[in-house]
Image (cartoon, grey):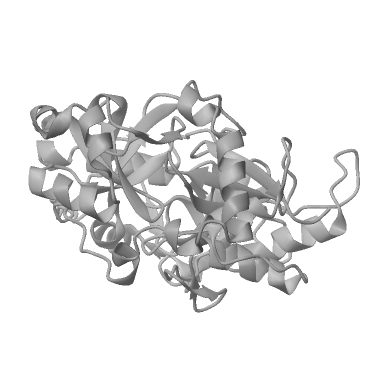
């Protein structure tokens, strides 16, 4: 049996991840050691209130629209075409036996506890997510994907050699974070401003693997990094000297830099996410309206991301998504993440329907809705669309409540 060349040994990891043979736990929370981010809440709250009240114009806090309106083609090497063994099967990893991909769906595929359409939903696989197939019986496939095990309708997945061929087209070159509370930078140097703090086990798509100064200059212009920030980072000469030790990744709809020593590069398929059905009442004091909006939000998993959009079905950006969800329940929110933070009440213990706000180090640039069990749903970027993530995949700077 032939094995992939050395550069794409990371493709083997994808099969293990897709099969669920390596399970990365989803953390309900993590503690960031970065003081600049951890202590930003007061400043962020004041800034957001200014945006909401009109002291700061909304246009000054939105991210640069160019990448979303006319997305640049990712500057990464195309996925390899894996070599076949004598049976025509791709050797993805030593333990791999049977791959399945949820390709025959428009948005997502429900994973159920038992092989029945009336059985409890335990997870969801978005389009082109991968899984390991244990068996197929009477139109149902028992699968494991990420940390989700259950049954899916087999008519919605491709299997075996077709899945292996499709994996080379729908997989993504990613990095997996190998250390907790990793500081992701606005420039490729440890002296650069901190863009965000990300959690161990999280996965981010590679924007560019082999950095050049032309690319760095493009990012500086696109993300409006000041000359002062560049000088604090040691200047362009210092950045160029350390360039080979960094990778540019996609963080929602923007880009940031991560040091190679703290990540693992791999060719990866999307994985299922574990979700359950919420209930109101009980000791946690969750209201029926909070349950309702969280369940409503899940209906739009897998739909498109469109910068400036607010359509739950035809495309929305992060704040357009949350704004439209709350509009359904009679609440008016501005179409701006920072402004939404300014009109929500800060809470420390999240409940379904609460909004998680994330910063790029200087301003709030992303918002997501909490759906319980340590998870959020959000319009992330053009590649992933509306997705479910660990609520602490990035360290939030504020958790805001709209409804009780």
How many numbered dots are placed on residues in this image? 0
Residue 375 drawn at (x, y percent)? 61, 46
Residue 134 drawn at (x, y percent)? 48, 49
Q: Quadrant of residue 291?
A: bottom right
Front position in the image: 222 or 14 = 222
Q: Is residue 51 visible?
A: yes
What residue is drawn where x is 66% and y is 65%?
333
What residue is drawn where x is 62% and y is 66%?
323
What residue is drawn where x is 29% and y is 66%?
66
Q: Quadrant of residue 307?
A: bottom left
Q: Is residue 178 above or below residue 291?
A: above
Residue 51 drawn at (x, y percent)? 56, 56
Q: Is residue 377 above or below residue 179?
A: below
Q: Seen in the image, is 27 located left or right of residue 170?
A: right
Front position in the image: 195 or 21 = 195
Front position in the image: 269 or 329 = 329
Front position in the image: 316 or 92 = 316
Quadrant the N terminus occupies: top left
Q: Quadrant of residue 322?
A: bottom right
Q: Is residue 91 above or below residue 54?
A: above
What residue is drawn where x is 32% and y is 44%?
14
Q: Seen in the image, is 126 located left or right of residue 11?
A: right
Residue 368 drawn at (x, y percent)? 57, 53
Residue that extends furthest to the front in the rendered view of this protein: 55
Q: Seen in the image, is 143 located left or right of residue 21?
A: right
Q: Is residue 138 visible?
A: no
């Amino acid at each position: 049996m032939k094995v992939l060349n050395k550069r794409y040994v990371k493709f083997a990891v994808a099969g293990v991840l897709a099969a669920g043979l390596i399970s990365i736990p989803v953390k309900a929370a993590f503690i960031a050691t970065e003081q600049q981010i951890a202590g930003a809440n007061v400043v962020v709250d004041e800034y957001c209130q200014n945006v909401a009240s009109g002291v700061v114009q909304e246009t000054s806090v939105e991210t640069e629209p160019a990448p979303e309106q006319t997305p640049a083609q990712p500057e990464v090497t195309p996925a390899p075409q894996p070599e076949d063994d004598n049976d025509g099967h791709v050797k993805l990893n030593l333990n791999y036996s049977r791959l399945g991909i949820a390709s025959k769906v428009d948005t997502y595929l429900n994973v159920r506890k038992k092989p029945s359409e009336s059985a409890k939903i335990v997870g969801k696989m978005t389009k082109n997510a991968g899984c390991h197939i244990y068996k197929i019986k009477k139109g149902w496939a028992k699968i494991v994907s990420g940390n989700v095990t259950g049954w899916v309708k087999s008519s919605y997945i491709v299997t075996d050699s077709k899945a292996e061929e499709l994996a080379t087209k729908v997989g993504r070159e990613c990095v997996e974070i190998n250390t907790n509370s990793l500081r992701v930078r606005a420039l490729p140097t440890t002296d650069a401003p901190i863009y965000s703090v990300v959690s161990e086990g999280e996965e981010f798509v590679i924007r560019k693997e082999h950095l050049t100064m032309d690319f760095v200059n493009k990012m500086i212009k696109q993300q409006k990094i000041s000359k002062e920030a560049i000088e604090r980072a040691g200047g362009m000469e210092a950045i160029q000297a350390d360039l080979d030790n960094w990778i540019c990744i996609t963080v929602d709809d923007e880009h940031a830099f991560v040091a190679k020593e703290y990540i693992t590069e791999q060719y990866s398929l999307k994985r299922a996410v574990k979700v359950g059905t919420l209930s109101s009442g009980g000791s946690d004091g969750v209201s029926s309206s909070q349950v309702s909006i969280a369940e409503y939000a899940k209906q739009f998993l897998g739909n498109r991301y469109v910068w400036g959009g607010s359509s739950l079905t035809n495309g929305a950006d992060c704040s357009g998504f949350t704004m439209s969800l709350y509009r359904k329940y009679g609440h008016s929110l501005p179409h701006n993440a920072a402004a939404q933070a300014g009109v929500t009440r800060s809470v420390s213990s999240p409940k379904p329907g609460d909004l998680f706000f994330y910063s790029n180090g200087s301003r709030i640039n992303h918002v997501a809705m909490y759906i319980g069990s340590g998870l959020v749903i959000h319009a992330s970027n053009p590649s992933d669309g509306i997705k479910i993530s660990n609520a602490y995949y990035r360290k939030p700077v504020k958790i805001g409540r709209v409804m009780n």
